[in-house]
Image: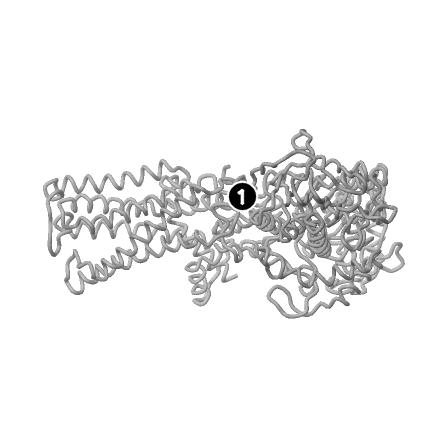
């Protein structure tokens, strides 16, 4: 469905929800619906990003297809969510990746290939396939400067696109009226995000992969998100070790960066595999049109990045370390390049939607 | 979508030999309560739901709360609601129940329902926003009636109740007041399924427009059925044919005003309109016909279905203006809208002169009335107008003007079968069928003959279902 029709259809369904209100107990989407009479595109996009896709409302709805009212809130909100990502992201030719998985895959592949090719041509096969040991071993494969500059450029680029997107979201969701949130509201939104409160289906759990509620999806999601944070902590600690204390990696197995990195990597692998398995088993009727492919892509990239990170640890004293390191870094690059144009952006918009809900 | 749970159970035998202890006919709240309750007593149970899986549970799908006695504070409601007050409310709204003992028993046993429901998987939520101040008397289960039924089906199947969808029971084989088997039509293949006892929980006949037509004539063509299209009263008719004693007014039905654009069946809650006290209601001739401000809306909404059913063409139009359009819940269908009254008359196919005259007369009779207060009977009345509007009467003078077409939306019918104190269907002779039990709407006429008390349908269904299931299991196992 093209954008305009999508918003009209969302408006039609939300208007019916607003006359019914049976789902009020499930999540804030319905409570936010009830404070409105008409749904602007900004409202629809706000509600779409507030939805955590727990699907409780779908199974509870007496108007779900094949009923002629054909109410399918998880699906229409998933579709408008992707549409909102596309509208807020930039530049436009890269935002197409949000609708077209092949474009996103191509983007990821290019990033991956560039890093690999650069490594092979600049560093050379010899150094990649040689065994490196002792302090600074990784930098004998990829020079520190290249690793840091490359990483920083990609990181800040992604952050910039996110921030601009976030500002656009905030402005549209508030229908261009200025809206300020207090620190207290932000703190509450952080608590909502960390606890995934709204993935609880109003109490009993998320209706995923099928029509009976459970908390397992929340656990997998927490493992993935927590694992990612743990990996970030590991990287930050490593930077401190290196720049403050002048200790160069690889670090000892019992050192904090290795412990955080290992725990994070294992958690992410378990979490992403769980989410992939659940997604595979889940009903496709309440699923978005392109959302599942976007989710798979993100999950697979996270999983491979974690896996390659752990492999470095396991093989770091062997000649295979160099090539694994190149593959890992190229996967990280692919993850960052696609961050503004894939599922990763949900972190930004869903959090802002939570802040807005707390502010309302 | 629910395929993993919906697979049709294999029936061990299609013979008239009892294949099950208890056959539950119907698939709504009462049927599910009966099935689970019979199962608790050790009976083998087969539940036959006529609808396909996605339409299972009849009008339970459209419910949202249940009225229960409460004696102490809890999580889902507040305050005390005694048996005495419950009974007073019932008598005030619906008159004296034909079977007062059954009414009292239903109320008494409602006290234990929330606990029983929780044990069977039901989750609770706060009362919905703006729900007629029912927080003390009623309890809201999470997600409404379809969610309730989902929970019960899952629980029932876990408990070993066999469930078959798309199984239409057309007739019962009854010999010497004893049920032998049900004649079941599955995908146009007829079979007989024998059982030691049967619980009939097939609802009313409100979806049978042919039946309603024999009582209401052509007018029934213009009725809208708010709930499931499957409640056509087939088994009610069969039981009456076999000598069951009817109870309740055959013509009686509960109806509210719904948007005329609603689907013929199953539009449910979203098609009802709460606009009437905010404006005026005119008929096809552009004339008012009843006091729109007679009493607070929760006490009057159920009378408008009948009022519209008595108007020519069974249609009416609620008219409000830009002052009051935001006073009521946003309707699902967009109101017709025009800047002048003749313009609105044109959109609604009304005689422009007659309609404008009605609005003009109304405005003259309410001149100077401002600031209606919907939360109470505000006494803002028309002067010298017939029929009067006795509350919330403010001029309709601020364009744009809005019109909503209304039709009678039939919710349920009152006539059913008489039951005895063991839930058995009673013959006209006064003798009960030995092993035919009734639960839910088909027996609610024993308690309810007119009017309706919000959330009481589920109370009757739950209590009668549990009792019928128990009695049926006891009979079958003895």
Other residues around mark 1 within 10 Å, as few (<14) / some (14–19) / many (≥20): many
The spot of residue B286 in percent (x, y) is 83, 45
Camera-side residue: A68 or A151? A68
Q: Residue at x 32, y 47 (%)?
A: A302
Q: Residue at x 82, y 60 (%)?
A: B100
Q: Image quarter for residue B76?
A: bottom right
- The answer, for residue B357, to whether it is visible in the render is no
Colour basis: one colour
- The answer, for residue B23, to whether it is visible in the render is yes
The residue at the far front in this view is B478
Camera-side residue: A65 or B361? A65
Q: Residue at x 80, y 63 (%)?
A: B380
Q: Is residue A29 left or right of residue A142?
A: right
The spot of residue A312 in percent (x, y) is 20, 49
The residue at the far top in this view is B189
Q: Is residue A132 left or right of residue A28?
A: left
Q: Image quarter for residue A12?
A: top right
Give the total number of marks visible in the rendering. 1
The spot of residue B105 in percent (x, y) is 76, 61
Subunit bearing disc 1: A
Which residue does the numbered mark 1 point to in the structure image?
A7
Camera-side residue: B143 or A244? B143
Q: Image quarter for residue A163?
A: bottom left
The spot of residue A92 in percent (x, y) is 38, 41
Figure quadrant of the N terminus of chain B:
top right
Q: Is residue B443 left or right of residue A151?
A: right
Q: Is residue B417 left or right of residue A29?
A: right
Element carrying mark 1: helix
């Amino acid at each position: 469905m093209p954008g305009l029709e999508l918003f009209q259809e969302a408006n039609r369904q939300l208007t019916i929800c607003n006359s019914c209100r049976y789902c009020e107990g499930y999540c804030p989407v319905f409570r936010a619906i009830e404070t409105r009479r008409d749904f602007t595109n900004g409202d629809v996009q706000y509600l779409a990003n507030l939805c955590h896709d727990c699907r409780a409302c779908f199974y509870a709805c007496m108007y779900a297809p094949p009923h002629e009212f054909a109410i399918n809130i998880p699906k229409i909100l998933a579709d408008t969510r992707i549409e909102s990502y596309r509208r807020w992201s930039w530049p436009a030719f890269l935002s197409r990746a949000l609708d077209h998985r092949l474009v996103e895959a191509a983007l990821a592949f290019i990033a991956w290939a560039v890093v690999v090719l650069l490594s092979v041509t600049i560093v050379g096969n010899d150094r990649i396939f040689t065994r490196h040991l002792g302090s600074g071993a990784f930098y004998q494969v990829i020079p520190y400067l290249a690793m840091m500059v490359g990483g920083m450029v990609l990181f800040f680029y992604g952050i910039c696109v996110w921030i601009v997107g976030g500002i656009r979201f905030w402005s549209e969701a508030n229908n261009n009226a200025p809206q300020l949130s207090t620190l207290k509201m932000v703190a509450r939104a952080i608590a909502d995000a960390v606890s995934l409160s709204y993935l609880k289906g109003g109490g009993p759990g998320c209706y995923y992969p099928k029509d009976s509620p459970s908390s397992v999806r929340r656990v997998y999601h927490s493992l993935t998100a927590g694992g990612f944070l743990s990996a970030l902590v590991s990287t930050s600690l490593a930077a401190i070790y290196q720049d403050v204390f002048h200790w160069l990696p690889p670090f000892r197995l019992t050192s904090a960066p290795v412990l955080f990195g290992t725990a994070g990597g294992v958690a992410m692998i378990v979490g992403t595999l769980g989410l992939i398995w659940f997604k595979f088993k889940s009903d496709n009727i309440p699923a978005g049109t392109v959302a599942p492919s976007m989710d798979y892509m993100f999950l697979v990239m996270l999983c491979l990045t974690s896996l390659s990170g752990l492999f470095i640890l396991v093989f770091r004293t062997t000649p295979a370390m160099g090539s694994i390191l190149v593959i890992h870094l190229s996967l990280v690059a692919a993850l960052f390049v696609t961050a503004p144009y894939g599922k990763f952006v949900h972190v930004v918009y869903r959090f802002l939607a939570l802040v807005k809900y707390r502010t309302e | 979508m629910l395929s993993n749970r919906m697979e049709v159970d294999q029936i061990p035998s299609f013979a008239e030999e009892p294949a099950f202890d208890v056959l539950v006919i119907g698939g709504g709240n009462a049927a599910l309560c009966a099935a689970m309750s019979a199962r608790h007593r050790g009976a083998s149970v087969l539940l036959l739901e006529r609808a396909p899986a996605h339409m299972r549970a009849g009008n339970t799908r459209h419910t949202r709360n249940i009225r229960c006695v409460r004696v102490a504070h809890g999580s889902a409601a507040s305050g005390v609601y005694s048996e005495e007050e419950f009974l007073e409310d019932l008598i005030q709204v619906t008159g004296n129940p034909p079977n007062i003992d059954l009414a009292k028993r239903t109320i008494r046993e409602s006290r234990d329902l929330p606990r029983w429901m929780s044990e069977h998987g039901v989750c609770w939520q706060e009362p919905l926003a703006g729900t007629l101040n029912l927080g003390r008397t009623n309890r809201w289960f999470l997600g409404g009636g379809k969610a309730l039924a989902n929970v019960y089906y899952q629980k029932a199947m876990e408990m070993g109740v066999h469930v078959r969808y798309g199984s239409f029971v057309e007739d019962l084989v009854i010999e010497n007041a004893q049920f032998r088997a049900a004649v079941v039509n599955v995908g146009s293949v007829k079979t007989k399924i024998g059982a030691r006892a049967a619980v009939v929980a097939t609802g009313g006949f409100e979806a049978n427009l042919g039946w309603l037509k024999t009582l209401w004539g052509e007018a029934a063509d213009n009725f809208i059925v708010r709930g499931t299209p499957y409640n056509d009263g087939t088994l009610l008719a069969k039981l009456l044919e076999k000598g069951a004693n009817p109870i309740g007014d055959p013509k009686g039905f509960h109806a509210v005003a719904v948007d005329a654009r609603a689907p013929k069946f199953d539009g449910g809650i979203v098609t009802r309109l709460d606009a009437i006290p905010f404006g005026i209601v005119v008929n096809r001739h552009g004339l008012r016909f009843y006091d729109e401000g007679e009493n607070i809306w929760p006490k009057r909404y159920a009378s408008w279905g009948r009022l519209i059913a008595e108007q020519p063409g069974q249609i009416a139009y609620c008219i409000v203006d830009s002052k009051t359009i935001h006073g009521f819940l946003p309707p699902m269908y967009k109101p017709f809208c025009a800047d002048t009254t003749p313009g609105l008359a044109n959109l609604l196919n009304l005689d422009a002169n007659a309609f404008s005259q009605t609005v003009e007369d109304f405005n003259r009779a309410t001149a100077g009335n401002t600031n209606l207060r919907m939360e109470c009977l505000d006494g803002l009345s028309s002067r010298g107008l017939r029929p009067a509007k006795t509350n919330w009467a403010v001029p309709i003078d601020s364009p744009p003007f809005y019109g909503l077409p209304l039709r009678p939306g039939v919710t349920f019918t009152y006539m059913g079968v008489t039951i005895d104190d063991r839930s058995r269907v009673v013959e006209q002779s006064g003798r009960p069928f030995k092993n035919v039990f009734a639960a839910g709407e088909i027996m609610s006429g024993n308690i309810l003959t007119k009017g309706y008390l919000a959330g009481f349908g589920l109370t009757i269904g739950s209590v009668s279902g549990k009792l019928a299931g128990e009695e049926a299991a006891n009979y079958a196992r003895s």
